[in-house]
Amino acid sequence: MSDLVLHNYYRSSTSYRVRIALEMKGLTYQYVPHHLRHGEHLEPAYLAVNPQGLVPALILGDGTLLTQSLAIIEFLDETRPEPPLLPQDALGRARVRMLAQMIACDIHPVNNLRVLTSLRTLFGAGDEDVANWFRHWVNEGFQPLEKILASSSETGTFCHGDTPGLADICLVAQVASNARFGVDLMPYPMITRVHAACMAVPAFRKAAPENQIDAE
């Protein structure tokens, strides 16, 4: 797999997910930044690439467009199997997808930039209101996630066993976003431990927001 182009933004948690997966798979790619807070993702040139106007978007060597971080990551896992990001057994795969989707489908959608912007523009929310909204929905998701991780024998060094995978990718990206809104991780010792284990993995560190060319 060559000539990959990743349209993304350094601080986007969904972009961070895909960067981690690309780094774990040892894939090189062209990094194309779009500053979300400056509205660059809504410019005609990018909408011609991705009509949804969201990041990340991965362009394959033949020009094929892939969007949605989980779909991109599973494509990478299927076409570049090593190291695997999902377990070999069906039940294990279901558990990892469950954990990943608790973050990607329940927490992230109500806390992404366009929702937070709409709170301000449509409902007059101030900065503290927005931060409280963000923290509320993180805690709504992290409380059950912590309980599941802490009570399951399937949890190891990482969310599932002793190698990082899809669930860990989603967790790490969410924790990075949490830091900007002052989310207290003290109630979540298992999540904190797994996050620390992930950040000891070079691929996670290399993909981190602060290490990207458009970081501010």
Image (cartoon, rainbow, N blue to C red):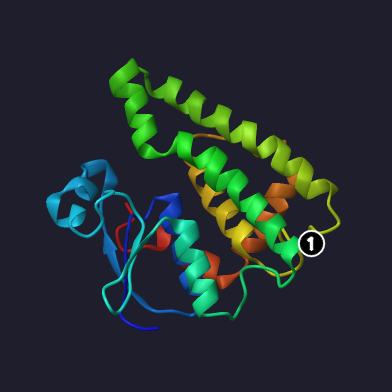
- The amino acid beneath tag 1 is Gly
Quarter location, residue 125: top left
Residue sitting at 33 percent across and 27 percent down?
118
Residue found farthest to the left: 44
Determine if residue 188 is in view. no
Quarter location, residue 97: bottom right
Write down the residue under mark 1. 156
Q: Secondary structure at mark 1?
A: loop
Residue sitting at 84 percent across and 47 percent down?
151
**Label 1, residues with CA under 10 Å away: few <14, some 14-19, many ≥20:** some
Q: Position of residue 42 (x, y in %)?
A: 20, 46
Task: Decide which of 212, 108 is in the foreground and name it.
Answer: 108
Determine if residue 171 is in view. yes
Q: Position of residue 76 (x, y in %)?
A: 49, 72
Locate the N terminus by quadrant: bottom left
Residue found farthest to the top: 124
Q: Position of residue 79 (x, y in %)?
A: 50, 79
